[in-house]
Each structure stands twice: as C-alpha cells, then as structure tokens.
Image (cartoon, helix red, strand yellow):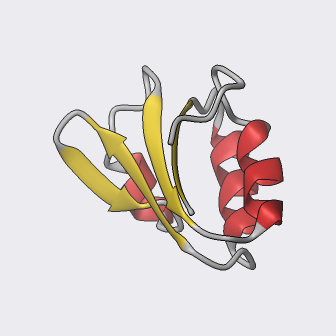
Amino acid sequence: MRRTMNIQFKSYEMIERFIREIADVRGEFDLVSGRRVVDARSFLGIFSLDLSGPLVLNAVTDDPKAFEVFQRYAINTAYQA
C-alpha cells in the first residue's frame, strides 16, 4: 500500500527516535523536501533536507506498525492515497 503524509521534526531527538522506530518496519520510505528525495532511514540524508518546514513522507508498506510510528510525527492526521 502506498501512502503519503506530511511530517515534521522539531528536534534532533525526534529524528533519532524516528530512525530507530522505522528500522524494523518492512517497506520503502522516502522523505521529500522541495526537489530533494532521501531514504527516510538515512540519518545523514534527513539532515541534508530543509528541516525548518514540513516534509513529505512517501511510504510503500503493508506493515500496520509503520502507520502507528508515522502518526507520532504527522502534521495532520489524514493519510493521502
């Protein structure tokens, strides 16, 4: 299942927790900021993005645990198909 949502990190600790939480989740996850796309599991990739605003998370997964994790970082609660 492919889903897209807006997320935002407010601190270094949030980014660190996000990466730890998705490490064991099955699927493909990308973060988009403007024209840049990085692997959401990449610590350095995330820090190469503009973190001052929201990011777009593109997720391709059937793991229900993934959406529980992402909900903690969501700006809005509605998923987009």
Measured from the top left, where is residue 19 in percent x and y?
65, 62
Identified at 27% across, 53% down, the residue is 37
Q: Quadrant of residue 5?
A: top right
Q: Is residue 61 left or right of residue 66?
A: left
Q: Residue furthest left?
A: 35
Identified at 57% across, 29% down, the residue is 8
Compared to residue 18, the image places residue 54 above or below, namely above
Which sits in the foreground, 64 or 28?
64
Measured from the top left, where is residue 27 in percent x and y?
58, 75
Identified at 41% across, 48% down, the residue is 47
Compared to residue 24, the image places residue 41 above or below, namely above
Which sits in the foreground, 14 or 7?
7
Compared to residue 62, the image places residue 3 above or below, namely above
Which sits in the foreground, 26 or 33?
26
Compared to residue 61, the image places residue 53 above or below, namely above
Q: Quadrant of the N terminus?
A: bottom right
Q: Is residue 24 left or right of residue 42?
A: right
Which sits in the foreground, 59 or 1?
1
Measured from the top left, where is residue 49 in percent x and y?
33, 42
Q: Is residue 35 left or right of residue 3?
A: left
Q: Is residue 2 left or right of residue 65?
A: left
Identified at 47% across, 67% down, the residue is 42
Q: How many marks?
A: 0
